């Protein structure tokens, strides 16, 4: 049986031990930082030539120019014919559901006019151009293409540039098909820090974008962190997480598999069960021991559960909510009797899956809400990726003569109090005698 950490909230050192288990260091080491820093500077200086060199070196390619690395739109359409009808239908249905959900997130411009005729408001506009990073080769995720591209297009982004590495020339047809379905505008077969640099700084071939989104390895994550400020980024994501609150009345096999669904991502993923029923926790442990033998990714799941998995015995459901709010998980399953009522008590979670029939896995692919979610307790202050990440807001101020006079008097007092005389006089010129 797997040796999974078990904690009890009644123990005096519970919170200290929990904090220790949740800790995950996302900061790359000096070697990674220095490598990425060198690549960013080189691409910024030499553009296409540097991107081609790094692509040939890291992805074992042999191309002579960037022209060979752009995947034409016709090739994306061709991918739609190469995948199975079942796969195409699944991608199209998932994209339609994502679009339907995303349309509810659109922010609209607004304004109001004060009694003296002064207009105040907010103007919402889409970003001009967004870069989408997609992992390539064997670690190919067409779902990530949809999750990042669909809300960007719903937001009204005119141009979406996708980069996806093709190591050894290995192209994933599902990824290209997803790009076609979600109306990606241009696709380049590049990856790593060099792709992030090309998007952030622009080259003769790759246009500079306003924001870079999408998952990647430690080099990609480090590059995104370093180019932030030149461009926007979605987030720096840590390992995947799931926390399941169960009252002990769900099939233990279901709970075990839900924990596996995130553990199979990688060895650093974290799966947590919170339950007031000690006997049920034992049943889940037995299910885990039996079902893990059937898993193709048994080794990864086992390592993940042994290193970072946690089974937490709480006194009651109120304490379960307290623990969940402290952890602020990426994915939270409420496998309980009245999940909608419990959800109202949850203050920190990336996505909340309510009820015994709602598997986190449907959220990863096709439920509608985005699967790009805050990890490593960042749900305390951040939100899932959405249309709003591809829109920005400008304040609107249009003073009437009367408004300018009234506001000018206030501004004058405050500006002079700050010692900013030009500010004050600029406002004072508009004050009526």
Image (cartoon, grey):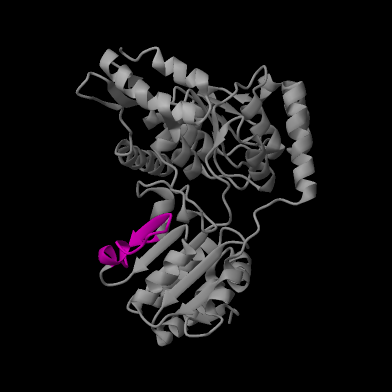
Q: Position of residue 424 (x, y in %)?
A: 45, 21
Residue placed most toward the observer, 290 or 399: 399
Between 320 and 114, the residue placed more toward the observer is 114
Give yes or no for residue 395 being in the magenta stretch. Answer: no
Give the quadrant of residue 235: top right
Horizontal and vertical percent for residue 402?
A: 26, 16
Q: Residue at x 74, y 39 (%)?
A: 36
- In the image, 364: left or right of 17? left
Residue 345: quadrant of the picture: bottom left
Q: Residue furthest front?
A: 433
Q: Quadrant of residue 72?
A: top right
Q: Is 174 drawn above or below residue 400 in the view shown?
A: below
**Residue 96 x/y as whole percent:** 33, 38
Residue range (magenta) = 339-359
Q: Is residue 349 magenta?
A: yes
Question: Which quadrant would the N terminus be assigned to in this image?
Answer: bottom right
Q: Can you name the residue that lies furthest to the bottom here?
A: 279
């Amino acid at each position: 049986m797997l040796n999974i950490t078990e904690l009890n909230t009644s123990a005096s050192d519970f919170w200290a031990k929990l904090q220790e288990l949740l800790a995950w260091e996302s900061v790359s080491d000096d070697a990674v930082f220095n490598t990425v820093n060198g690549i960013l500077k080189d691409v910024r200086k030499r553009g296409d030539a540097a991107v081609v060199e790094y692509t040939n070196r890291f992805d074992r390619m042999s191309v002579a120019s960037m022209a060979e690395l752009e995947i034409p739109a016709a090739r994306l359409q061709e991918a739609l014919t190469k995948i199975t009808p079942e796969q195409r239908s699944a991608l199209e249905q998932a994209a339609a559901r994502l679009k339907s959900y995303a349309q509810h997130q659109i922010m609209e411009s607004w304004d109001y006019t004060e009694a003296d005729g002064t207009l105040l408001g907010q103007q919402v506009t889409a970003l001009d151009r967004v870069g989408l990073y997609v992992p390539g080769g064997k670690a190919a995720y067409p779902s990530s293409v949809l999750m990042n591209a669909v809300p960007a297009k719903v937001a009204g982004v005119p141009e979406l540039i996708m980069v996806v590495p093709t190591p050894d020339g290995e192209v994933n047809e599902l990824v290209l098909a997803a790009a076609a379905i979600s109306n990606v505008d241009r696709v380049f077969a590049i990856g790593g820090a060099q792709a992030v640099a090309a998007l952030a700084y622009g080259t003769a071939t790759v246009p500079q974008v306003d924001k870079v989104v999408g998952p990647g390895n430690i080099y990609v994550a480090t590059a995104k962190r370093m180019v932030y400020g030149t461009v926007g980024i979605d987030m720096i994501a840590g390992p995947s997480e799931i926390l399941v609150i169960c009252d002990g009345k769900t099939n233990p096999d279901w709970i075990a598999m839900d924990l596996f669904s995130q553990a199979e991502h990688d060895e650093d993923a974290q799966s947590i069960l919170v339950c007031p029923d000690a006997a049920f926790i034992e049943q889940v442990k037995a299910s885990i021991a039996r079902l893990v033998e059937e898993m193709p990714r048994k080794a990864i799941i086992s390592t993940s559960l042994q290193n970072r998995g946690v089974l937490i015995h709480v006194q009651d459901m109120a304490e379960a909510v307290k623990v969940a709010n402290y952890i602020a998980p990426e994915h939270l399953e409420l496998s309980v009797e009245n999940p909608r009522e419990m959800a109202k008590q949850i203050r920190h979670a990336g996505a909340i899956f309510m009820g015994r029939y709602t598997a986190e896995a449907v959220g990863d692919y096709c439920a509608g809400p985005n699967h790009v979610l805050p990890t490593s307790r960042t749900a305390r202050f951040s939100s899932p990726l959405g249309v709003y990440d591809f829109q920005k807001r400008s304040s609107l101020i249009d003073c009437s003569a009367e408004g300018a006079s009234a506001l000018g008097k206030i501004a004058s007092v405050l500006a002079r109090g700050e010692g900013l005389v030009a500010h004050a006089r600029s406002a004072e010129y508009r004050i009526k005698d």
